[in-house]
Image (cartoon, rainbow, N blue to C red):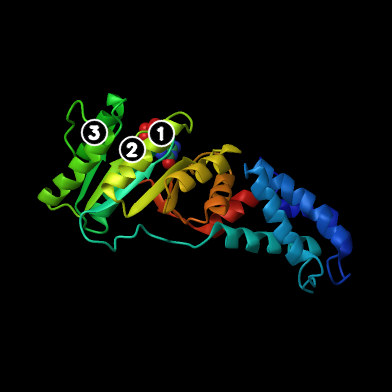
Amino acid sequence: MFESLQDRLGSILNGLTGRGALSEKDVSAALREVRRALLEADVALEVVRSFTDKVREKAVGADVLKSIKPGQMVVKIVHDELVAMLGEEGVAIDLNAPAPLVVMMVGLQGSGKTTTTGKIAARLASRDKKKALMASLDTRRPAAQEQLRQLGEQTGVDTLPIVAGQSPTQIAERAVQAARLGGHDIVILDTAGRTHIDEPLMVEMADIKAKSSPHEILLVADALTGQDAVNLARNFDERVGITGLVLTRMDGDGRGGAALSMRAVTGKPIKLIGTGEKMDALEEFHPRRIADRILG
Ligand code: GDP
């Protein structure tokens, strides 16, 4: 579907074999292709810019290894830099806190927050032998509350019974209390989303955070998010303060550039990726795999 970066750079840089170091001009020509590849992969423009600046710094004057072609050399520099920028591998949810440890899930409506809440709770139960309690804080959408209840039933994870008329912060407080009484290790708060970021949403998230002192705040985002990824990640991080990212729909056709955009603007680790609708479709993040995918 996409032309790989290696192929694109091959035709530009093949004439350089044997010339030794990469010149400013060669690198600039190569970076035009790198830029195009990253934009096609949905990496946000400002992140593409800072990324290509870094690659330029590393590539200009770099000696081309005898064993590879200049095009391959640039691809290697780009790939290494992508992996470095995507960040560390296998950063798990931090379970190092007294019970009940609160995990707050935030993100836009439709990003996969409720599904991911169910997946994480199921994984904590089966792999880590932790007793989890899930609570839906979406008071505006009864369907969302019902969806979480059904996921709990399906996975055997407890959900907080719904009490009509409570505010999201009241539900959060009740969830923590219920976990204490019920001997739960972890409370996962599935907060309400909106179709876009707005002030009431950010105020609501900050209130819930203040009332429930979460140990982890995970921003759930669709891997297909394009230029909006920067705004989304920056807003949630600045206003609420996230501790990690979860990218959903990595099973789709997209190349996952949002991973780079969101990681670059927040500096927060990508902790997990969603790869399907089923409850076991949750995987660790591997920066090399995403880098390969972004480069095509
Ligand atoms: P929420 O509004 O953020 O709570 O989003 P939901 O959890 O309800 O998810 C919205 C839709 O996306 C549902 O149909 C989910 O089954 C689907 N979904 C969630 N995560 C993934 C994923 O990783 N891959 C795929 N293919 N679908 C997903």
Label 2 and label 1: CA atoms lie apart by 10 Å
Image quadrant assignment for residue 174: top left
Query: In the image, is the residue at mark 2 within 8 Å of ligand 1 by its beta carbon?
Result: no
Q: Is 161 situated left or right of 71 in this image?
A: left
Q: Are discs 3 and 2 less than 8 Å apart at CB?
A: no
Mark 3 vs 1, N-terminal side: 3
The image quadrant in which ligand 1 is located: top left
Q: Amino acid at mark 1?
A: Leu
Query: Dot 3: few (<14), some (14–19), or many (≥20) neighbours within 10 Å?
Result: some
Q: Amino acid at mark 3?
A: Gln
Q: Residue at the spot x=85%, y=59% of the render? A: 26
Residue bearing the label numbered 1: 201
Please say if 136 is above or below 275. above
Residue bearing the label numbered 2: 191
Q: Nearer the viewer, mark 3 or mark 1?
A: 1
Q: Residue at the spot x=50%, y=42% of the render? A: 235
Task: Say which of 247 and 218 sits in front.
Answer: 218
- Callout 2: SS: loop
Q: Residue at the spot x=16%, y=35% of the render? A: 161
Q: Nearer the viewer, mark 3 or mark 2?
A: 2
Q: Position of residue 152 (x, y in %)?
A: 22, 39
